[in-house]
C-alpha cells in the first residue's frame, strides 16, 4: 500500500494504491485488512485503486466484499522484433516536446481520454481526471525517466506519446493520445507506425503499453499493427463517501 501524491494533488484528497494482494484464507484476510482501513482513516484516504491479474478471482471477490468495485479490464499490447519490420517513412515527424509545445500538448491530454478508469467511474470528477493527464504531460518535462514526444503532420501537432525505456532495446508507452482535431481521420495508424519507425531507428526491438479493454478502436489498431496481448488485469476502485 502506498500513497499516490500526484493524484492527490489533482483530486484534492489523499489517494492510495494497493501494489500487491494475496488472499489465502478469507476470514484472516478480512481481519488483516482492518489495519489497512485504519490506515485509510489516519491518512484521510478517500480513494484507493488496485490492479489484479485476471485469474486472481479470490482476491477480486475479497475486494468486492471490502466495498471495492470492478471498474475495467486492461490489456497489455506488446510487439517484438521491431528491428525486422518494414516501416517506411510516412511524412510524420517525431521530436521531443519543448516548453513552447506544452500548452497544446496539455490541451490534447486533457481532452483525448474517455475510456480509462478515471473517466468511466461515475464517482470520480471527470474534469479532475482531465487535469490528471494534463499534469502528467507537464511533469514529463522534468521527469527523470519518462520523455514527452510530439508527432506532427505537415507542421500540425497530431499526437503525443509519453515513453520510457525499460532497457536499451525495450520501450514502454505510458500515455498515447491523438489530438481531437485529428481523430477519425486515419491519423492514429500513421502516427503509431511513425512512432514505431522512430524507435526502430533508435535500436529498439520491443514496445509495450497498457490499454483499456473497452477502447475497441485502439484495441483494433494495435491488433492491425501486429501487436500481441499479454494476460489482462482487472482494476478495482474504492471510493469513500464524503
Image (cartoon, helix red, strand yellow):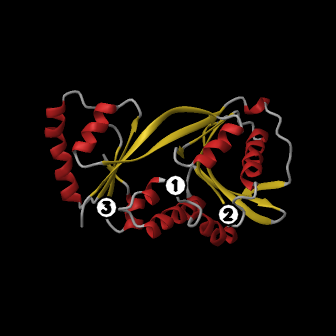
The crowding category of the residue bearing disc 1, from other C-alpha atoms within 10 Å (few below 14, some 14 to 19, many at least 20), is some
Going 69% across and 68% down the picture, which residue do you hit? 101
| Secondary structure state at the residue bearing disc 2 | loop
Nearest to N terminus: mark 3 or mark 2: 3
Q: Position of residue 94 (x, y in %)?
A: 76, 54
Q: Position of residue 156 (x, y in %)?
A: 78, 66
Q: Is residue 164 visible?
A: no
Q: Position of residue 89 (x, y in %)?
A: 86, 46
The crowding category of the residue bearing disc 2, from other C-alpha atoms within 10 Å (few below 14, some 14 to 19, many at least 20), is many
Mark count: 3
Q: Is residue 112 visible?
A: yes
Q: Which residue is mark 1?
A: 115
Judge depth for marks 3 and 1 and give the one in front: 1
Tell me the number on the disc at residue 188: none
Tell me the number on the disc at residue 14: 3
Going 77% across and 60% down the picture, which residue do you hit? 152
| Secondary structure state at the residue bearing disc 1 | loop
Q: Which residue is mark 2?
A: 179
Q: Are marks 2 and 1 in contact (CB under 8 Å)?
A: no
Amino acid at each position: 500500500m502506498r500513497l499516490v501524491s500526484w493524484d492527490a494533488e489533482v483530486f484534492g484528497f489523499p489517494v492510495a494504491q494497493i501494489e500487491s494482494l494475496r488472499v489465502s484464507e478469507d476470514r484472516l484476510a478480512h481481519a488483516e485488512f482492518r489495519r489497512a482501513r485504519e490506515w485509510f482513516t489516519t491518512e484521510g484516504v478517500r480513494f484507493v485503486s488496485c490492479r489484479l491479474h485476471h485469474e486472481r478471482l479470490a482476491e477480486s471477490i475479497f475486494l468486492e466484499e471490502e466495498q471495492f468495485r470492478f471498474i475495467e479490464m486492461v490489456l497489455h499490447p506488446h510487439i517484438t522484433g521491431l528491428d525486422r519490420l518494414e516501416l517506411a517513412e510516412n511524412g510524420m515527424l517525431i521530436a521531443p516536446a519543448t516548453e513552447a509545445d506544452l500548452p497544446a500538448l496539455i490541451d490534447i491530454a486533457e481532452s483525448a481520454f474517455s475510456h480509462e478508469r478515471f473517466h468511466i467511474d461515475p464517482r470520480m470528477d471527470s474534469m479532475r481526471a482531465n487535469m490528471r493527464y494534463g499534469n502528467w504531460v507537464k511533469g514529463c518535462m522534468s521527469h527523470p525517466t519518462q520523455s514527452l514526444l510530439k508527432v506532427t503532420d505537415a507542421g500540425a501537432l497530431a499526437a503525443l506519446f509519453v515513453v520510457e525505456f525499460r532497457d536499451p532495446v525495450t520501450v514502454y508507452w505510458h500515455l498515447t493520445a491523438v489530438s481531437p482535431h485529428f481523430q477519425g481521420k486515419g491519423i492514429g495508424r500513421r502516427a503509431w507506425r511513425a512512432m514505431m519507425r522512430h524507435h526502430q531507428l533508435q535500436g529498439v526491438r520491443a514496445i509495450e503499453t497498457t490499454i483499456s479493454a473497452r477502447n475497441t478502436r485502439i484495441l483494433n489498431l494495435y491488433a492491425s499493427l501486429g501487436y500481441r496481448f499479454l494476460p489482462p488485469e482487472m482494476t478495482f476502485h474504492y471510493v469513500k463517501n464524503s
